Image (cartoon, rainbow, N blue to C red):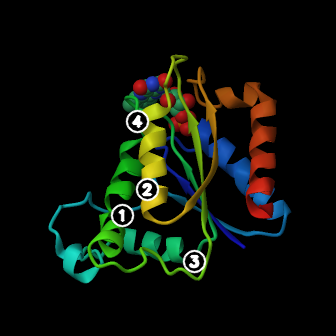
Amino acid sequence: MKVLGIAGSPRRGGNTDLLLAEVIKGAASKGAETKTIVLNDLHFIACQHCDACLKKGKCKYQDDMQMIYNEFEQADRIVLASPIQFTGVTAQMKAMIDRCQCLWARKYVLKIPPLSNERQRKGFFISVGGRRVANLFQPALIMVKTLFRILDIDYAGELLFSGMDEKGAITKHPDTLYQAFLAGQKLVEE
Ligand SMILES: Cc1cc2nc3c(=O)[nH]c(=O)nc-3n(C[C@H](O)[C@H](O)[C@H](O)COP(=O)(O)O)c2cc1C
C-alpha cells in the first residue's frame, strides 16, 4: 500500500503540514509505504491550455509535474493538504490541479483511463482556514472532489479545521493531530 502526501502550503511546518505529517504517520504505523511531496519546492508552470494533451493524453511540458503524474500512478492513497487562501486552495495546489488537464483529456477525449486502473485509489483532503465562517471549505472541497472524480480516485474523506491562523496553531488542539493520525490509519485499512 503506497500513500502519497501532497503538501500545498508555502509555509513549512505550518498547520496543514503538521496534520499531513500525522496522517502519513498513521498510515505508516499500519505498514504503508509513504512519501510526501512539497509543491512549493517544485518547479512547474501553470497549464498553458495548449491542448497538446487532447491528442497525446500527456502533458508536453517536461517539468516537475511529470514526477507527480508518475507518483499518482504509483499511489494507492493520495492525501492532498492545502490551507484556505482567498476561499480556495493555494496557488501551488491549484496549479497542480490544473496541470491534471492531461488526465482529464485521457478520460473524456481519448476515452482511456486517466491513471492505470491496476489500483483502486482513494483520496483524502486536509485543510485549515484562519477564519471561522460558514462554508469556508466549500469552494476548495468542490475543486478537490472534482479532481479526484476525474482521476477515478474514490473520495475517502477530509479533515477541516477553521479558526487556526498562526503557524502551529493546530498544536494547541492536540486532538486534531490525533484525529489526523487515526484518519491515516483508517485510510489504509479501508
Ligand atoms: C494569501 C493568504 C490568503 C488567505 N485567505 C484565507 C481565507 O480566505 N480564509 C481563511 O479562513 N483563511 C485564509 N488565510 C489564512 C490561512 O488559511 C491560515 O493561516 C492557515 O492556518 C494556514 O495554514 P498553513 O499553516 O498550513 O499554511 C489566508 C492566508 C494567506 C497567506
On the image, the x and y values in percent for residue 120 come to: 62, 72
On the image, the x and y values in percent for residue 46 come to: 26, 57
Nearest to N terminus: mark 2 or mark 1:
1
The three-letter amino acid code for the residue at tag 3 is Gln
Q: Are marks 3 and 1 in contact (CB under 8 Å)?
A: no
Viewer-closest of 85 and 14: 85
How far apart in space, not on screen, are marks 2 and 3 (Cα)? 17 Å
Tell me the tag on residue 74.
Answer: 3
The three-letter amino acid code for the residue at tag 1 is Cys
On the image, the x and y values in percent for residue 80 come to: 55, 52
Q: For label 4, count other residues whose C-alpha is less than 10 Å away and answer few (under 14), some (14-19) or many (20+).
A: many
**Is residue 64 visible in this depiction of the protein?**
no
Quarter of image, res 85: top left
Residue behind mark 2: 147
Asked if 167 appears above or below 19 in the picture, the reply is: above
How far apart in space, not on screen, are marks 4 and 1 (Cα)? 17 Å
Asked if 54 appears above or below 80 in the picture, the reply is: below
Determine whether the residue tagged by mark 3 lies in a helix, strand or loop: helix
Quarter of image, res 88: top left
How far apart in space, not on screen, are marks 4 and 3 (Cα)? 27 Å
Q: Are marks 2 and 1 in contact (CB under 8 Å)?
A: yes
Asked if 23 appears above or below 27 in the picture, the reply is: above
Residue behind mark 1: 100
Residue behind mark 4: 88
Q: Are marks 4 and 1 in contact (CB under 8 Å)?
A: no
